[in-house]
């Protein structure tokens, strides 16, 4: 009798699994799914926006409820989709079914655990976004705009050190336990959806067996360029701050590069400018002089896209976005982001915009994301994504490669004087390299660290040490003050508590030059790539839009082929773009060892290390007492 029951159960399970082959029925399922998923995502994103623009406990609870409700919806839809024999369908139907079944953390069966994961994530987000850094014990400041400005503009090494350490004490240090819990819960959830760990799941978005080796090879190929930038920057910074502030290992102390994470160095442009006496290519002063408001900065960016015949931001964008840091006392997530509300109508940006060159680049970046959302909004909901996450980021940066060319800035009145000669070219390329080349090892290493954390190769008791191993080895930067496992420096970077994969940015910084080159060709540009601007080119706009409209409906190599004529990631356009600068840097660095030691400096070696322990007066007293006692 028991055996009979078992046979019936197994048979009906088999019958339930993957047996609907009727394509018309499958299409009806997809149509119905698209209506429902759009509503479900819209409600979820609204709750998330509410929390991100007002970090209260009440908004956190609502966001968590919405996340759980949507997870239940996704799980149910995945179950229903698995009734279809979708693996035998043709693309794009097969592809859409796959995406419905690939539900990430929503696969977690234990609802209490899924709720806990969501709670941990909202707490991590809040710790980061409300964190303050104490530059001195009685001077505690938020990241935006205060600590950001100190890192960008102060040349007082003690103040820089205070801001750098203060931010890490005020954020990452408080996250270690929560982050460890998040890693375990996230992995557990992801394993239930069939991946070995979260890193494997994140890499699956690139749909390539070779993705890890592909990015490693690109990184190796680009390393010589970075080494030249690093060596030149180090020489100049030693002139500014004195040799005693630099370790003998060849590393650059991480607080001296103009940015809280030393990820992009262009805030040092005026200190390090290759050829003095030329008009600046940094527009910060001009934005301030012309009293640029946040809205004006976004209007300038909007005009860039429309000049190419691309889509303008809809009225609701201007009504609903948060383009400035609120002054009503609300705590918000200031880290800039772009938002798709999945109703085909509501698209927003949230940015605590300041009138600086770096922020103008970010304005274009976020608007580039929204342009992608607008272009693919007709696609089924699950194809409303980048061809891969690196595509979304690369697309986001394409406009600003043209926007920043001195000729264009001059034309739109943001560079008062235009000088076009080889020396000015070097200055411009140097500013771009401080953004693009300086970023490469940073963009590469974050997920090298996280992939090992998720796989378990890196244990919680070595989180910070492994982080600094990578920072020292790959980026050639070292901590200005001693670090231990009491610290959790990865947590001081938005995307770690924010649960946002990062290799997308490394991919982006390579492929955006492929996109730029392809669009410049279509725009009829001749001459060096770094001089090209696609502003006003409707030919480039059409080519660009056609690719964006694909969303993720096809595997990314097809989207790449569509725009560049070839299907692979390729570092050559980036190298071509910077070729004149590489030659110039190599000449400047003649006779300089452009390398640095593999491992971090041993702490006592640096001046800061010596002074960061006991104050020297106290240390002397201690030695006198001990010697006397002996
Ligand atoms: C400033 C920028 C992100 C971005 C935000 C936060 C995380 C994801 C989004 C997504 C977009 C999308 C950022 C810019 C270059 C390097 C990196 C950094 N903020 N995100 N919703 N950047 O990519 O815009 O807006 O649709 O996928 O973090 O480290 O500063
Ligand atoms: Zn982005």
Image (tube, rainbow, N blue to C red):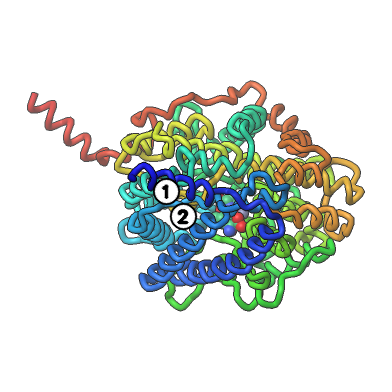
> Circle 2: is it few (<14), some (14-19), or many (20+) Cα within 10 Å?
many
Query: Which label belongs to residue 189?
Result: 1
From the viewer's side, name the closer residue of 327 and 18.
18
From the viewer's side, name the closer residue of 471 and 253.
471
Whether the residues at callouts 1 and 2 have beta carbons within 8 Å, the answer is yes
Give the Cα distance between marks 1 and 2. 7 Å
Q: Position of residue 249 (x, y in %)?
A: 47, 26
Q: Is residue 7 visible?
A: yes
In the picture, the quarter occupied by the C terminus is: top left
Q: Residue 513 occupies which quadrant of the picture?
A: top right
Which element type, helix, strand or loop, lies under badge 1?
helix
Picture residue at 50% right of the left edge, 74% below the top: 326
Point out the residue furthest to the left here: 629
* Relative vertical location of residue 261 with respect to residue 400 in this rendering, above or below: above
Give the residue pinned by disc 2.
Answer: 106
Q: Position of residue 11 (x, y in %)?
A: 48, 46
């Amino acid at each position: 009798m028991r055996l009979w029951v078992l046979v019936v159960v197994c048979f009906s399970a088999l019958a339930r699994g993957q047996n609907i082959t009727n394509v018309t029925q499958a299409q009806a399922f997809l149509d119905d799914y698209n209506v429902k998923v759009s509503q479900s995502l819209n409600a979820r994103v609204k709750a998330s926006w509410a929390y991100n623009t007002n970090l209260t406990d009440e908004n956190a609870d609502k966001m968590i409820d919405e996340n759980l409700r949507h997870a239940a919806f996704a799980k149910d839809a995945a179950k229903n989709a698995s009734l279809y024999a979708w693996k035998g369908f043709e693309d794009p139907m097969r592809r859409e079914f796959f995406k419905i079944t690939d539900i990430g953390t929503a696969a977690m069966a234990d609802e209490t655990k899924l709720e806990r994961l969501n709670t941990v994530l909202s707490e991590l987000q809040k710790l980061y976004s409300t964190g303050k850094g104490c530059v001195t014990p009685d001077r505690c400041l938020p990241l935006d705009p205060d600590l950001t400005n100190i890192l960008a503009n102060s040349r007082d090494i003690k103040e820089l050190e205070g801001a750098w350490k203060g931010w890490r004490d005020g954020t990452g240090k408080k996250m270690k336990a929560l982050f460890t819990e998040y890693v375990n819960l996230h992995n557990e959830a992801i394993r239930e959806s069939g991946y070995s760990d979260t890193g494997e799941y994140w890499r699956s978005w690139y749909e390539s067996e070779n993705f890890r080796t592909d990015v490693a090879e690109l990184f190796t190929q680009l390393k010589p360029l970075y080494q030249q930038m690093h060596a030149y920057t180090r020489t100049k910074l030693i002139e500014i701050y004195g040799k005693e502030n630099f370790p003998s290992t060849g590393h650059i102390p991480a607080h001296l590069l103009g940015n809280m994470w030393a990820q992009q160095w262009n805030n040092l442009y005026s200190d390090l400018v290759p050829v003095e006496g030329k008009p600046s290519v940094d527009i910060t002063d001009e934005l301030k002089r012309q009293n640029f408001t946040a809205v004006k900065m976004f209007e300038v960016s909007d005009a860039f896209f429309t000049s190419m015949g691309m889509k303008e931001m809809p009225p609701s964008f201007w009504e609903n976005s948060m383009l400035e840091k609120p002054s009503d006392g609300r705590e918000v997530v200031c880290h800039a982001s772009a938002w798709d509300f999945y109703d085909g109508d509501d698209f927003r940006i949230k940015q605590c915009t300041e009138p600086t060159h770096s922020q103008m680049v970010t304005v274009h970046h976020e608007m580039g994301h929204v342009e992608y959302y607008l272009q693919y909004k007709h696609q089924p909901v699950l194809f409303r994504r980048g061809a891969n996450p690196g595509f979304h980021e690369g697309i986001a940066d394409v406009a600003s490669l043209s926007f920043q060319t001195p000729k264009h800035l001059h034309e739109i009145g943001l560079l008062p004087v235009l000088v076009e000669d080889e020396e000015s070219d070097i200055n411009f390329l140097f500013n771009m390299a401080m953004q693009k080349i300086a970023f490469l090892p940073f963009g590469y290493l974050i997920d090298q660290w996280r992939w090992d954390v998720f796989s378990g190769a890196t244990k919680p008791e070595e989180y910070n040490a492994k982080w600094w191993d990578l920072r020292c080895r790959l980026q050639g930067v070292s901590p200005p003050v001693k670090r231990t496992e009491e610290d959790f420096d990865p947590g001081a970077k938005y995307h770690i508590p924010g649960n946002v994969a990062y290799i997308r940015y490394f991919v982006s910084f390579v492929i955006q030059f492929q996109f730029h080159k392809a669009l410049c060709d279509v725009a009829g540009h001749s001459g060096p790539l770094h001089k090209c601007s696609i502003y006003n080119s409707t030919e480039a706009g059409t080519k660009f839009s056609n690719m964006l409209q694909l969303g993720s409906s096809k595997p990314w190599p097809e989207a790449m082929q569509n725009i560049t004529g070839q299907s692979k990631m390729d570092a050559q356009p980036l190298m071509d773009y910077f070729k004149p600068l590489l030659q110039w840097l190599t000449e400047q660095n003649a006779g300089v060892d452009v390398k640095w030691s593999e491992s971090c400096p041993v702490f006592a070696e640096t001046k800061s290390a010596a002074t960061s322990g006991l104050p020297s007066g106290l240390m002397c007293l201690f030695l006198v007492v001990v010697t006397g006692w002996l």
